[in-house]
């Protein structure tokens, strides 16, 4: 979407922004070499340590060991806009907010900001753990450039909103993560910054407080202030934001209305793959025994889908042709997350041909994954069709056959219950049967 804005309307201007991180060893290993590199960069000269690394290791470590989190990003944000920033994990969303809030510096490019910025990037950001909640309110206000009397005018409102009045004079190091978030958001929203940056940190609050925060952000925006909101909650993005920016691998790939951008994000365009077909059987994966014809990820209504809530059932549908008789064929699926197999499944118990050879013909197999089983994150599927027996001969082997994404709407009606924090990063989080009794009652 083309945007023509005058500088008088623009409160954030991002131009050609890049951010690189070095992987592995930090810097060049010694203070002397780091100073050499810094001085060369300041003078616009070649880094002398590039040659040293090449001689010592045979690799240009200063180039090859770098990860580009943001790549040539440019956009404007006008006063009063609520801009949602979405994308898969690792797309660069949080890095962008950290640069805008001056937590970290860009490698290249510029950011121009008009007005005071308050940010809520992660639990406890900007709080001193040894100070009380009261003292941190005044500290944050002072950082924003507010006078003591201005903070005092807002103090009671902040405490009331955060609902931690009993603990306001307790050092925040003794707060729970939920209390941190309540106070941090109340401070950021009530101290009247012109620009408010909010990361996914709201996900650690309970459901009523999240709704309360979203309502407050609407109120803040209606007052003419600007909000940048990073979230995986597409419902919140749709309800709150007037505009959405989609990041993918550190680049802006779409900037437009929330409906359009979210629609693109949820389609099979950002790495997810909901269907694959091979119309020509002669070039389809497989051999003269079996050929794969199609694979799909389906929702419970039988529609192709790549985005699921943790509570949704998921169906994997496979179509293949058996071209040669005389084989005990088994289908194997491995579900992979972050490079690790989280679980596998075979059709060897449920196939009608588990104890006999498969006749030739066109087959359709479906694997049903129940709701409340998978954890959040992107899942890819490895598929194999093999002849089971002596040698276990493989006929079809396909990496990343399908890719889909699982997210959590943070609704207490699911396996989460009233647990407010991020779930641990396991691949699965099944809903198991628990029985809890009080033997003293």
Image: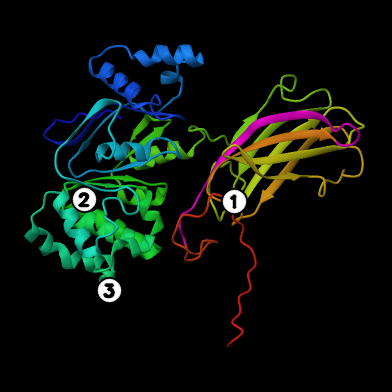
Instruction: Name the residue that disc number 1 marks.
Output: 374
Against 345, is 57 above or below?
above
Q: Which image quadrant for residue 347? A: top right
**N-term mark: 1 or 2:** 2
Give the magenta-colored segment's residue range: 388-411
Kindly identify the residue that appears in the image at 27 percent across and 32 percent down: 105
For this view, does 122 lie left or right of residue 372? left
Q: Position of residue 76 (x, y in %)?
A: 23, 33
* Disc 1 element: loop
**N-term mark: 3 or 2:** 3
Q: Which image quadrant for residue 114? A: top left
Q: Nearer the viewer, mark 1 or mark 2?
A: 1
**Mark sitting on residue 166:** 3
For this view, does 176 lie left or right of residue 336? left
Task: Report how far apart the C-alphas of labels 1 and 2 lie in the structure.
Answer: 36 Å
Instruction: Name the residue that disc number 2 marks.
Output: 221
* Disc 3 element: helix
Against 43, is 340 above or below?
below
Residue 191 seen:
no
> Any magenta on residue 62?
no
């Amino acid at each position: 979407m083309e945007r023509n804005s005058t500088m008088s309307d623009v409160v954030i201007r991002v131009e050609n922004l890049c951010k690189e991180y070095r992987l592995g060893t930090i810097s060049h290993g010694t203070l002397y070499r780091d100073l050499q590199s810094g001085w060369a960069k300041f003078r616009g000269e070649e880094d002398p340590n590039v040659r040293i690394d090449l001689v010592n290791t045979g690799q240009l470590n200063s180039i090859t060991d770098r990860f580009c989190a943001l790549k040539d990003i440019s956009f404007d944000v006008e006063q009063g806009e609520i801009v949602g920033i979405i994308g898969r994990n690792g797309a660069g969303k949080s890095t962008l907010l950290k640069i805008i809030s001056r937590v970290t510096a860009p490698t290249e490019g510029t950011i121009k900001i008009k007005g005071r910025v308050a940010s809520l990037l992660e639990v406890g950001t900007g709080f001193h753990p040894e100070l009380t909640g009261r003292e941190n309110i005044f500290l944050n206000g002072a950082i924003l450039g507010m006078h003591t009397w201005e903070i005092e005018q807002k103090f009671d409102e902040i405490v009331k909103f955060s609902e931690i009045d009993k603990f306001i004079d307790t050092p925040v190091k003794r707060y729970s993560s939920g209390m941190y978030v309540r106070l941090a958001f109340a401070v950021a929203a009530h101290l009247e910054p012109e620009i408010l940056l909010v990361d996914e940190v709201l996900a650690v609050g309970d459901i009523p407080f999240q709704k309360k925060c979203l309502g407050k952000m609407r109120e803040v925006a209606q007052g003419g202030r600007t909000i940048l909101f990073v979230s995986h909650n597409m419902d919140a993005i749709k309800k709150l934001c007037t505009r959405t920016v989609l990041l993918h691998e550190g680049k802006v790939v779409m900037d437009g209305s929330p409906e359009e951008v979210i629609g693109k994000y949820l389609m099979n365009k950002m790495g997810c793959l909901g269907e694959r077909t091979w119309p020509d059987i002669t070039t389809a994966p497989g051999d003269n025994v079996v050929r794969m014809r199609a694979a799909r990820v389906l929702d419970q209504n039988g529609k192709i889908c790549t985005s699921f809530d943790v509570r949704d059932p998921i169906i994997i549908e496979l179509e293949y042709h058996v071209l040669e008789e005389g084989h005990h064929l088994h289908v194997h699926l491995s579900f992979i997350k972050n490079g690790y197999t989280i679980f596998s499944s075979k059709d060897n118990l449920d196939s009608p041909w588990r104890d006999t050879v498969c006749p030739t013909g066109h087959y359709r197999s479906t694997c049903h994954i129940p709701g409340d089983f998978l954890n959040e994150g992107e899942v890819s599927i490895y598929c194999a069709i093999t002849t089971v027996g002596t040698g276990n001969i493989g006929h079809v082997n396909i990496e990343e056959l399908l890719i889909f994404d699982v997210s959590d709407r943070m609704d207490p009606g699911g396996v989460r219950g009233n647990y407010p924090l991020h779930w641990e990063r396991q691949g699965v989080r099944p809903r198991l049967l628990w029985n809890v009794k009080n033997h003293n009652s």
